[in-house]
Amino acid sequence: MPEDQPVLQAIDLRKHFPVRGSRPKKFVHAVDDVNLSLHRGTVVALVGESGSGKSTIARLLAQLMPVTGGQILLHGQDATAKNRTAFHRYVRRVQMIFQDPFGSLNPVHTVRYTLTRSLKIHRGRLRGVELEAALDELLDRVQLRPAARYIDKFPHELSGGQRQRVAIARALAADPEVLLADEPISMLDVSIRLGILNLLRDLRDRLQLAILYITHDIASARYFADRTMVMYAGRIVETGDSESVTQDPKHPYTQLLVRSAPDPDDLESRARGARGEAPSLVAPPSGCRFNPRCPFATDLCRTEVPPLISVGEGREAACWGYSDRPDRPSLGSVLDAYGERPAVDVSVLEVDR
Ligand code: ATP
Ligand code: MG
């Protein structure tokens, strides 16, 4: 297979959740027309504020729920699992890591039990020395050494970072090609976040994993991801190599996001203060969904959805300002509109000790 073929691909992905009790029936437009490709040995970051649809994409890619529209391809083949056996096969290839390692590990089971169970599910029953060797290797991969120090511990006897490492080891027991990591560091102490990202990077390189890294922290995307995709209200608004997207953002929303770094938690309040509420996804704004908050929006932006337009090598932005339409908006100075923009600062991630 050619190196550049994606392992996992989403084409025109769409998810609309019915609003319970609504009549006529209404829908939350959580994800619309999302395309993405994950390649071996590459990290793609999916960045956006709360409610933009990031976790929905991860859950769709993990096939934890059905799509409303679009397709998921694994090695170019339709991956829709139609029965348990097919789903099981899919899960071996595509594993998910969650935000809360405490919630995702069963508190009544030791590390040994959790990892043995995952090995058994995905690799068949191992015994004796073989099992011990496999457990040792898993803990070694996530840098919990020596294994004997951790193997018989319960989740509550471990730190948050150690728990997340166990959750990663459990995912690795399936020997996957793809890791979907949904905010894997956001619940961890700032001081240990970088250690987990460095571990994931090490796994990317050593196991040639394709990793989708979901975060609302664009600084960590710059630090960790090869490519970055920015989401706003269910749609992708900008993509490109992480360095360019974070240092020279093209879409007004990305500029706002970068402007808010390195304090991403403050993003929403600042954005709302400056530009009103994030849009309702039940009745999303027509045209560009960012138009109510965009200082440059014109009638075109209010009526037609902008496609992703090439804005440089390997870069795209869904903003009419980059089109050649005669009625396109003039982007002017976003910095004037939003204030001075500090460069993305990766120092919010402190070194693991
Ligand atoms: P966060 O950063 O807070 O985790 P997110 O980007 O992961 O946000 P999602 O969890 O994907 O966002 O949610 C996107 C939208 O879909 C939100 O408006 C959310 O309320 C809605 N949503 C998510 N899951 C469901 C569901 N099962 N039923 C109805 N609406 C849902
Ligand atoms: Mg989420």
Image (tube, grey):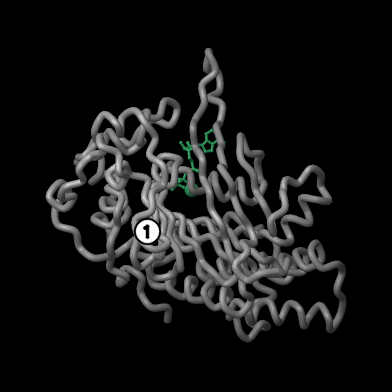
Q: Identify the residue at image location x=81%, y=44%.
A: 83
**Percent position of residue 26, x then y:** 51, 21
**Percent position of residue 155, x then y:** 61, 65
- How many numbered callouts? 1
The image quadrant that residue 14 belongs to is top right
Query: Can residue 129 be seen?
Result: yes
Which residue occupies the foreground of this view, 269 or 110?
269
**Percent position of residue 191, x then y:** 39, 72
Position above or below: 161 against 72 = below
The local secondary structure at tag 1 comes to loop
Position above or below: 112 against 340 = below
Residue type, label 1 = Asp
Q: Relative to residue 80, is residue 273 drawn left or right?
A: left
Mark 1: few, some, or many residues within 10 Å (few <14, many ≥20)? many
Q: Identify the residue at image location x=85%, y=67%.
A: 124
Quadrant occupied by the N terminus: bottom right
Q: Relative to residue 259, is residue 350 drawn left or right?
A: right
**Percent position of residue 244, x then y:** 34, 65
Task: Determine which residue is flagged by label 1.
Answer: 217
The image quadrant that residue 125 belongs to is bottom right
Q: Identify the residue at image location x=60%, y=62%.
A: 179
Q: Identify the residue at image location x=56%, y=26%.
A: 18
Quadrant occupied by the C terminus: bottom left
Give the residue furthest to the top.
23
Query: Can residue 107 be seen?
Result: no
Q: Relative to residue 178, is residue 112 drawn left or right?
A: right
